[in-house]
Image (cartoon, grey):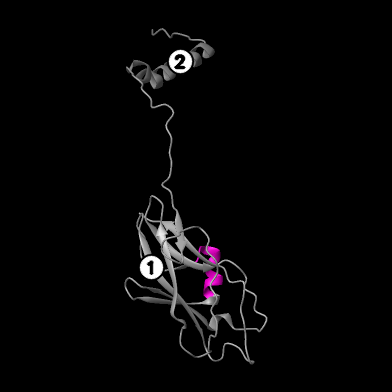
Amino acid sequence: MQRRIFINPIARGTLFIALLLGILSGVTYAALQGQSKFTGSTIQTATANLVVSRDGTTFSNTQSGLAFMNVIPGGTLSPSPGYPVYLKNAGGTPLSIKLGVSSTPTNPDGVDLAKVSVVLTSTASGQAQTFSLQSLIDSNATGGAIVSILPVLFQQQVHPFTLQVSMTTDAFSGPAASIGAIDFTVTGNAVN
């Protein structure tokens, strides 16, 4: 006749849990460890610093506005040859450039701003890019419209442009019109 060993159910449960914990954690306790650390570490970004100039020598974050006078609807770009504008990357990372208008221009004569063109020309390459004034206003919410004629402005690089405007013959009706309080904003975004 076989003899059965009776183990109290509470003791059996306790033994099972103890064995399970021993198996699961036994490997961790058996391993030898050594630990080292780097203390006081910091993470700092590169600096994006785009500055502008009208003369190519005096750069700052803000320059005085431009007065586009005697624009003839349907006529040539004004002024001719164009206002000189210089961009300089004074930061530590390459930048992609965007152009926008950060203000809501005054428009007492109801000019259709989608029919007013802003032309940015690279004097280094001769390439020009045309934006409607309305698109520059609309795109400012996302940092502006991409300036594709200058894919990257590298650190300490200065790039010369001219800025001109024109408007179509049907941009407004009346003897004359003006648009004021236009804040052109140039934004530099870090690129890899």
- The structure residue drawn at horizontal position 52% and vertical position 74%, both measured from the top left corner, is 135
Observer-nearest of 95 and 124: 124
Amino acid marked by disc 1: Pro
Observer-nearest of 159 and 22: 159
- The structure residue drawn at horizontal position 37% and vertical position 16%, both measured from the top left corner, is 29
User: Magenta stretch: residue 141 in it?
Assistant: yes
- The structure residue drawn at horizontal position 37% and vertical position 20%, both measured from the top left corner, is 28
User: Magenta stretch: residue 107 in it?
Assistant: no
The alpha-carbon separation of the residues under discs 2 and 1 comes to 77 Å
SS at mark 1? strand
Q: Which residues are magenta?
A: 135-144
Q: Residues within 10 Å of mark 1 (few under 14, many from 20)?
A: some
Is residue 168 rendered to the left or right of residue 32?
Answer: right
Observer-nearest of 117 and 86: 86
Question: In which quadrant will I find the N terminus?
Answer: top left
**For residue 69, which quarter of the picture?**
bottom right
Q: Position of residue 151 (x, y in %)?
A: 36, 65
Which mark, by number, is residue 18?
2
- The structure residue drawn at horizontal position 44% and vertical position 8%, both measured from the top left corner, is 5
Which mark, by number, is residue 160?
1
Q: Position of residue 161 (x, y in %)?
A: 40, 70
Q: Residue furthest right?
A: 108
Q: Where is 4 relative to 127, above or below?
A: above
Q: Position of residue 38 (x, y in %)?
A: 38, 27
Q: Where is 192 relative to 160, above or below?
A: above
Amino acid marked by disc 2: Ala
Which mark, by number, is residue 15?
none
Q: Position of residue 42 (x, y in %)?
A: 43, 35
